[in-house]
Amino acid sequence: MNPISKRRGVAALAGLASAALLLSACGGNGGRDSDALQILVVKHPLTGPMADMGWVAEIEKAAGIEVEWEEVSADWDQKKSTMLAAGDIPDLVIGANAVTDSDMVTFNGLFEDLSDDLEALPNVAAMFEAVPETELMATRPEGQIYSLPSYRRYWPQTATRQYLNQQWLDNLGLEQPTTWQELHEVLLAFKNEDANGNGDPDDEIPIDWAPAGEAGFGYFAPTMLLGGLGLPITNGGGSGYFVEDGQVGNFLVDPRYRELVSFLHELYADGLVSQEVMTQDYSTYQSVGRGEGDVAKVGFSWGWTASDRFGPQLAGQYVSTSPLLGDDGVDPGDLAWSYDSYSLNFGLNTITMSAQSDKKEAALAVIDAFYDQDLSLQALWGEFGQNIEELGGDSYAVLPPSDDTLDPSSWKWTTTLADNSPGWIREDIEVTLPSDIQEAVEDAEPLADALANIDPATDIWPGELIKMNAEDSSRLSLLHTDMLGPAMQRWAVWITEGGVESEWDAYVAELEGLGLTEAVEIHQRYYDDYLASRG
Amino acid sequence: MTAATAVRPAGERAMRARRRGGAGPARHFRRYWQLWVMVAPAIAFVAVFAYVPMYGLQLAFREFDFTAGITGGDWVGLKYFHQFFESPQFWTLIRNTVVISVSTLVVGFAAPIGLALMINQVVGRRRRKFLQTATYLPHFISIVVIVGMLQVFLSPTSGLITRFAALFGVEGANFLGSEAAFVPVYVISDVWQHAGWNSIIYLAALSRVDPQLYEAARIDGAGRFSIVRHVDVPALVPTMIVLLILNMGNVLNTGFEKIFLMQNPLNLGVSEVIATYVYKIGILANQFSYATAIGLFNTLINFAFLLIANQIAKRVSNTSLW
Amino acid sequence: MTGPITALRGNTPGDLVFKLVLALSCGLVLLVAVYPIYFVVIASVSDPTMVSTGQVWLAPRDISWFGYEQIFADSRIWNGYRNTLLYAVVGTALNLLVTMPAAFALSRREFRPRRVLMFFFAFTMFFSGGLIPMYLLLRDLNLLDNWLVFILPSAVNVFNLIIARAFFEYSLPDDLHEAASIDGANYFQFFLKIALPLSMPILSVIGLYYLVQHWNDFFTGLVFVRDYSIQPLQIVLRDILISNQAFSGGAGGAGGAGAGSYAQQYADQIKYGVIVVSTLPVIMLYPFLQRYFEKGVMIGALKG
């Protein structure tokens, strides 16, 4: 290289940065067609492309203009906060709780208030009429409607069923336990003897449960046992709120919770609980439940259905059982269980519309189409012909998977939006359910009495039906972040190492100091308003 | 661009310039325009993509109000800083963060140096290449998988390492569910993952040692260990100082994802750090102003440490970042 | 050309001990470093239940290629590879074009503004305006959904700039430049003819750092890009991974009541397969760069 060309080279190099900037300014391809109705769908990761769903054509027909689908199946939360904060949203956002109550409060003005558009939404108005809970779920405290829920009707009232390995019981000649004490004895037998009969007396895990987060309790957690002391919980426990005699409480500081922790510690100290119960992730927890071949490893646990929890090969060994009485003093008429219907049969915030949309008419037409009788069914279980058979006269049957490597649930999630879709399953139609929902409903039968003891109107904390204003919801999220960390840590330590009896009073004082009392008061205020509004 | 010359009063500058025979800036540019051309693209990129968005920092002092725009919310001054300082978690968060980051810094700083010195001693090009490649590979394993592997290896019932520990009389240790083991597990796995990768820079530094120095040392009768100490180590010192200064600017930084994935209720007492707290409070609960304020606090502390480290380095070794 | 040692004959007893310790520690390091990689490879073809219950650690068990089949069955992956390759090559080229001259200029002690400039750069390692202003800026520059977003905002990594500058400072003695300027070389010539050839080790290290940064960049695609056709490999792999990690964290709720056991079963296998698929190209590249770390480069350049 001679010096001149070299100098030119470096100068060119210097200019490259600015040139690249210019290039980007000219070459930008937004790629979005502003004449089309833009719909963002937050799908389940298994779900295939929208273009493959037969019923989508009908939605597009309802829109009357071209529809552009944007499909998101991973990391929605991270994408979302930037998108919302920049005010950059499509005409419609679809997906179960894709836009949360907290988003609606924070990004005030970004979403269209649908409360004055109900004439354009006859299906939605009819749903509000037929299922009043849906209107409660949609309406903000100040009366606006920024998003609409879905109603699925056929799901069981609880997500968690309680399973016991009947084959192990039979092998050891034991009876099904009905109280915590009897459970303790059965678990001891599982541990001390070779319950699964594979010749190794030490490979049985008598009891195992799902990993709890640091933010509270979810499904399949041992908080289910609180029902045995007459304490009705929702959604597996959540942050601990419950209602008793019109009073909101938090079980994290309730003596019955102490009793449960102390019982679980007895089990743990006897070596009956999986040693990894506090540290395993969900996938390990599920793998262990599947045992080895036809040898089961877990004696007692909680799950959605037996085949989901233990795998199709072992499911037959397990039976679902009734709630266990905590102690002799509890009246069986007070037995309770986790009431999850508001989160299972309803989908919160499934469709949201942009306030800046300049295709309002088309967007409203799409929203209402989703709540059409036939489209609701198809969006939930799949298209007519392939996934659902029309039997005529408002009767339908959900068909088994045509791909026989898939179970009904995976089939549903693969071929349609399923639970992520808005929709309204009418009360006056007839649907033959797929086998996964049938199994869940059947396995829930032993829980029926306990669930019947609960009156959803007065005995539970109806979190899904209550909308809080900006100030309270932000205050609560702060209080919960500060409060739940220490509480969950104590839960784990007390169960594995003990100490609940001696440390309880200090712990209660600590949580109250961290704002638990204030948090309960906020809940109480909203609950009183809720009761008043329901008359 | 005139920042450097602007630090002195104009009059004095003019006088000095006259003494050198020419107007200051003009002379400077005539002499150094080529250097300016070389540094200009970098300045442009940093100005656009790092400095322009910095107006967002004022969110830490404002209420986030979507309708008014990011910077249109009410000015609340230090409200969110106070909120953080008065948070019941404050001291726990600081303590946990510092313990984790300082242990990682210390061990993570030393390990790559040792590794580079060691690899450099290996005779034979192929062997050295193989060793180098092998040690830098774990860097590419994603954090999710690293934590998944920790779960498998450290499982109290079936884990390879737990079973190995049992041979030495440590029975049924629950490394993942213990406060005492959290920091060691975090630090060791971090070093294991990144030491090889981080040693590359030192290997590059060792490659410019003049072979004649080795010859001379050998003739002076130095043993191999003594050659490492007196020839190799000094060659690494400049790189070490630069990295040490940069590391000091990380006292309140910890990896977010790995800690978050390793968290469970049993170790929460030591594993809740500023980064995970900000995630829980800021991202999950839409508290943008609060999250920005905590982030800014973090940055200020880090930056202060960097400034101090830089000053010390300048005094002691005449090396500094600026 | 090999290491410094072959040239030196004769072993003292101390050297023997040294050799022994060296051999042992190399063996240990090798074991500790190689095993996890080996584990990832065998886990990617083993039965996932066996892996997560700790039964796979020496050899694969119940070999199945399901994970790889799933990964490569996805047509998006080739597109992802192509995009990532483009971003990595073009991006790294731009990175080096911007970083190396700047580092050189900032290393010249006679260049007085360099201290202020270094502060100007270092400051951005700490203070940033956050995601939202960045998003708005990129939108104004028309960089959202534009492939240049993978290249332009990351054109300068200040850490790499500082490292490169430190190298120039150390490996270019002042008298070298004086000698060169007596020969009539200006800064451009000095940089291209002397500084760069002398700095091949650091050029390759910085190049590698940048390349890997582009290769692993996942966040840019996640937040700033919605057009799938320009998404990089990491996003594609992430989507494949997630779609098979269905339902972890609990069935039911808004997520999906009724977990599919199908997906659960293979999630882990795909997780390990993804590591192999995404890392292989970078591993193959390394030996090419490695020769610049060998001894003698500098001396050779000086003589030639």
Image (spheres, grey):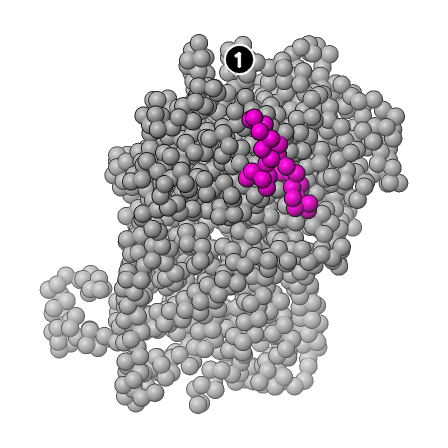
Residue located beneath label 1 in the image = A458
Q: Where is residue A331 shown, x and y percent of the image?
A: 68, 9
Give the chain of mark 1.
A
Residue A372 shows in this picture:
yes
Residue B98 shows in this picture:
no
Asked whether C11 or A329 is in front, the reply is: A329
In the displayed structure, C159 sits above or below C136; it is: below
Q: Quadrant of the N terminus of chain A?
A: bottom left
In the displayed structure, A129 sits above or below B173; it is: above
Q: Where is residue B44 shown, x and y percent of the image?
A: 28, 63
The quarter of the displayed image where residue A235 is located = top right
Is-magenta flag for residue A402?
yes
Q: Is B13 left, or right, of B281 in this rendering?
A: left
Asked whether A164 or A394 is in front, the reply is: A394
Q: Where is residue B8 shown, x and y percent of the image?
A: 17, 62
Q: Residue at x 63, y 49 (%)?
A: C267
Q: Quadrant of the C terminus of chain A?
A: top left
Amino acid found under the numbered disc labelled 1 = Thr
Q: Residue at x 60, y 18 (%)?
A: A232
Q: Where is residue A526 shown, x and y percent of the image?
A: 43, 18
Question: Furthest-front residue in view?
Answer: A392
In the displayed structure, C105 sits above or below B156; it is: below
Q: Residue at x 49, y 82 (%)?
A: C297
Residue stretch in magenta: A383-409
Is-magenta flag for residue A306?
no
Q: Residue at x 73, y 29 (%)?
A: A163
